[in-house]
Amino acid sequence: MLKFSAMQRLGVYIQVPFCQTKCTYCNFHTGVVSESRFAPYAEAVCREVRDHLSLLELAGVSCATDFLVDSVYIGGGTPSLLAPGLLAEILRAVRDSFACALQEVTLEADPETIEPEKAALWAASGINRISFGVQSFIDDELKAAGRLHRAADIYRAVPILRNLGFKNLSFDLIAGLPKQTALSWRRSLDDLIALSPEHASIYIMEIDEGSRLGLEVLQGGSRYSARDLPSEESMASFYELAQRELKSAGYEQYEISNWAKAGFTSQHNLKYWRREPYLGFGAGSHSFSGTHRWANLHDAASYVAAISAGKTAVQCVDLVTPELALEEELFLGLRKLAGIDLSRIRRQYGVDLEEKLFRLASSGMIEREGNMLRLPADKLSVSNEIIVELLR
C-alpha cells in the first residue's frame, strides 16, 4: 500500500476533458462531445470524489484522512462549458468528502463562454479565480489556431467578472502561434497589461506529433497554417519581450511560464512545482502522494463506465524512486525563479552535484547564491536544454 503523509495541505484537481472545438496546437486528451454527456460525467466525478477512499483502495492506494484541502483547480478542456449547477455539485462533493479551508478555487474558462448569470453562479459556488484561455488578442491568430473566441469576447468578459467581484483573473498567452509577428505579439502583451489581470502565463508554442499542427509541421505540410509559424529564434525573443514588459508593468515572474502581481501567485500550481501532494479526479487526471504517482483512464466514456460500476478509474500507479525523485526536484525546482536549496538536496538525497554545477556556472547557464541554485533570468527561454544537461 502507498500512503499519504498525515497533516498535510492538499490540492484537488478536477479534469473536465470537453471542448467546443479542438485547437490545432492542442495535444491534450480532450474531445468535442454532445452536451448530453456533461451531466453523467459530472455525476461520475462527484461519485469518485465521495468514494475516493474505497476506490483508491481498489487501486492499492491507501489515503490518509487528516489532511486539509486548501486549493481546487477545475481544468480541461473547457470546464466553463458545464452548467454552473454541475460545477457546484462537484465542489459540494469536495467539501463533503474532505476537511476544507479553501483559499483558491480556480475555473478554466474560455472568453466566449462567460455570461453574467453563469459567472454569478460560479461565484456563489465558491469559485474565486478564473483562468482565461486568451492565447492571443489578434483575431487572425485566433482563427489560425482554431479558437472560437475573438478579442472582443475578452474585452466583453472581463468587466462581467469584475462587476461580480472576481478579484483574481489569470490570462494565458502563447508565444509562437501561426501568423504571429513581433508587432502582433507586442500588441497582445499591451492588451493584456491594459486589462490588468492579477496573473499571467506565457507559453512557448510546442511542436510535437500529439497535435494536428505539430504533426503537420513535422511532416512538412501546410495545413493549419503550419508554414506561418514564427521561427524558434522569434519565439524566444517574444518570450524575452514578455519578461521585460510584464516586469515593467508590476508583475513578478515566479516560474518559467508564470507571472503574478504581489499576493497572486497560483497556490495550487505551486504544489506541482514544490512536489507537494495533490489528488486528481476525472478522466485523465493525475495524482501525487510524495512516493507514488498515478493516473486515471484518459477516455471519458471509459472513465464514466468504470466509476458507475463501482470500479476504480486508476489506470496506472508508479513508484517514485529516489533517483526519479531527485530528477523531479531538479526539473521542477529550477522552473521556479526562487530556485533550489542545495543543502536540502544534499541532506535528503545524499548527492553531490558540485562538479556539474561548477561546469554550468562557469558557462553562465546557472547561478548560485549561497545554497540557492537557479537559472539566470536571461536563460529561461532555453531552460529545457540547461535542465537536461544538469540531469545528464
Image (cartoon, rainbow, N blue to C red):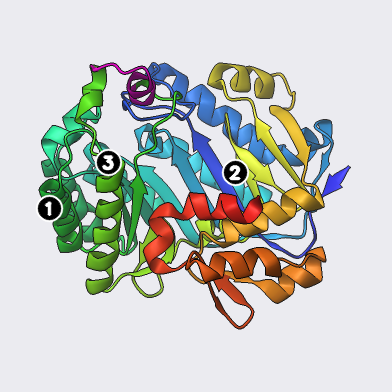
Q: Which residues are magenta?
A: 213-222
Decide if residue 103 is on the left or right side of residue 167: right
Q: Mark 1 = which residue?
A: 187
Between the C-alphas of marks 2 and 1, the distance is 42 Å
Q: From the viewer's perspective, is residue 307 above or below residue 203?
A: above
Q: Earlier in the sequence, mark 3 or mark 2?
A: 2
Between the C-alphas of marks 3 and 2, the distance is 39 Å
Depth order, front residue of 283/204: 204
Instruction: Point out which mark residue 93 bears.
Output: 2
* Viewer can see residue 277: no
Q: From the viewer's perspective, is residue 143 above or below residue 262?
A: above
Q: Mark 3 = which residue?
A: 176
Circle 1 or circle 3, nearest the eye: 3
Q: Earlier in the sequence, mark 1 or mark 3?
A: 3
Depth order, front residue of 183/292: 183
- State the image coordinates of residue 6 (x, y, percent, origin top left): 80, 61
Mark 3 and mark 2 residues within 8 Å of each other at the beta carbon: no
Residue at image point 23% right, 73% down: 248
- Name the residue type under label 1: Arg
- Name the residue type under label 3: Gly
The quadrant where residue 292 appears: top right
Q: Residue furthest right?
A: 1
Depth order, front residue of 343/134: 343
Residue at image point 66% right, 34% down: 295
Magenta residue check for 214: yes
Residue at image point 78% right, 54% down: 65
Mark 2 and mark 1 residues within 8 Å of each other at the beta carbon: no
Depth order, front residue of 255/278: 255
